[in-house]
Amino acid sequence: MRKIMLLLSLLMVAFPVGVFAVEYEIEETMITAELQNNGNVEVEERHTYNFEGEFNGITRTLIPKDHSDIENVTASEDGKDLEVEQEGNLYRIYRSGEDETVTIDISYIIEDGVEMFTDVGQFYWPFFDDRNESDYDDMTITVVPPEPTEAEAAYGYDEAYDTADISSGGEVTFRLGEVPSDRNGDIRVAYNAEVFPKAELTRDEDMLPTILGEKNELDEAAAIKQERQEFWRSAGPYIIGAFAVVAIILLLIGWRRRQETLVEAKRQMSASGQFPNSEMSLPAMLMFANYGQVTTPMITSSLLELVRKGCVEKVSDKEFRVVHRNTDYDHETDMIEWLFDEVGQEGTFHIEDLEVYLQEEENLERYQESFHSWSEAVKKERKQHHLYEKNTKARWVAGLAALAILPFIIIFPFYGVQGWMVGAIVLFAYFALFAGVYSPYTIEGQRLNQELKPLKAGDQWKDWEEKDQITAFLYQIGAGKRKPDVDLPTSAVTANDLVLFMILAGSLNHSFEEANQHTSAAASAGTGVAGGGGGVGGGGGGSGAF
């Protein structure tokens, strides 16, 4: 029980929001800010939430600007007061339920919300900012002057830009519509200073020219952005089209090269009825066919390959002994030293030696290190056979194309050209992948690939000579395509040596799989998981639920 409680505590610390998040949608938000003649602002907000599942209430973050305060925060639903709990700038409004749509009214006063100057009083305020984590589906903000008058200036920034509608009495409505999370949207409204007779002067200077000047700068910047947006919208098809042509050319180069090597490889292919003729060892072939990866079944095949070649002999179905160490490849020497000297003793390896060896904790890491060292030796041999072309020219072209298209992934969304951004991302991924992994087969690599591919699961080798039967069988075991003690019963073959290898493979494969699971589990147990913004004047806010 204590372990369960500890696990739950860790989950709550690691995933405080994501695991227990409330599903909701803020369908409509209406904010009315009534400016008072003393410079305070009385705010009424109405938020309509659509909840899925259980919920306890909503939250509203109200961050005042410098030199202003938020006071008297209250909440109600249909005239009924709701409990409000304050935590700094966060207000929790308790109203529990399940699967319903609720409308909650919030009211508060912004003290000194209006900044006073000799010519105008301005209400310059962020009701939300880029710290907000919720989307607003439909937001409307209305600013009401202390008395009917003419608005000297009214405009918004970012999400609120070009949303202001001024009525004849000076009332300003900002119809923002949908507002995504993590966005700013300050609003700015200025009235003649005479309508604020009781407000204290913030600064003894005229401010209207500055306000109008900033509005002109904002409009000019928006016009320039719109012009550039049109430019990039028009240029997008040509830019993406040009890169698409490069991508097609690279694709055709790759296809043509493959066809050329495929034709020549088929001409050079070994005669049917025998295992592929190659100077490459069986483990290297397996790695080549498995895209450069080494797996546990390859250990079984590699050890039995040493038995087939006479370097190791069978003492019993579960015991082997080294005959000589004059191997053909470095990785064969590594395997003998690993299994017969490190795991076993005095050149003898018994299957049970693995279990005894891995009971010692310090041997777990040594086993993994030895496996890695042997794998690297196999990889080294595979690389010596030049089975892949470097083809540096095509990869350099792809790499340069990836770098060239990268800036457009940033430019297109910045100017609102989302469609061409998607095309740029797709092409960038293609070029980066091409530059990183494109290594076509050489003729020898293509020949070997064509000859090995049918052998992964086919049974045509059962009609071959016994020597080639054994090698093909070991190849299928190493490729993980055949289980020696299930897929091929001894009645399927008549060669005594092949039957012997089937029995040995069944015993070895099971032991090496258990050893790999043991060491992998131990390695996993040692790992773990490590555990500014704002609107004008430092103010801002946001909405949520709990």
Image: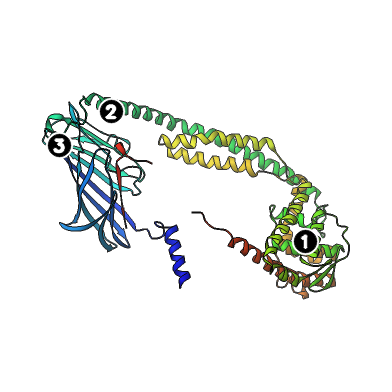
Helix, strand or loop at mark 1: helix
> Secondary structure under badge 2?
helix
Density class for disc 2 (Cα within 10 Å; few <14, some 14-19, many ≥20) is some
State left or right for residue 263 relative to residue 115.
right
The answer to whether any part of residue 460 appears in the image is no
The N terminus lies in which quarter of the figure?
bottom left
Residue 215 is marked as 2
- What's the residue at 17%, 26% (across, down)? 119
Do we see residue 429 in this rendering?
A: yes
Residue that numbered label 3 is attached to = 145
Q: Quadrant of residue 229?
A: top left
In this picture, residue 275 sits left or right of residue 403? right
Quarter of the view holding residue 148: top left
Residue in the foreground of this view, choosing between 324 and 109: 109
Q: Nearer the viewer, residue 253 or 474?
A: 474
In front: label 2 or label 1:
1
User: Which of these two is toward me, 227 or 45?
Assistant: 45
Please rate how many residues cluster around mark 3, counting C-alpha atoms within 10 Å: few if below 14, some from 14 to 19, many from 20. Answer: many
Q: Image check: 33 left or right of 456?
A: left
Mark 1 is surrounded, within 10 Å at the Cα level, by few (under 14), some (14 to 19) or many (20 or more) other residues, namely some
Nearest to N terminus: mark 2 or mark 1: 2
Q: Amino acid at mark 2?
A: Lys
Disc 1 target residue: 338
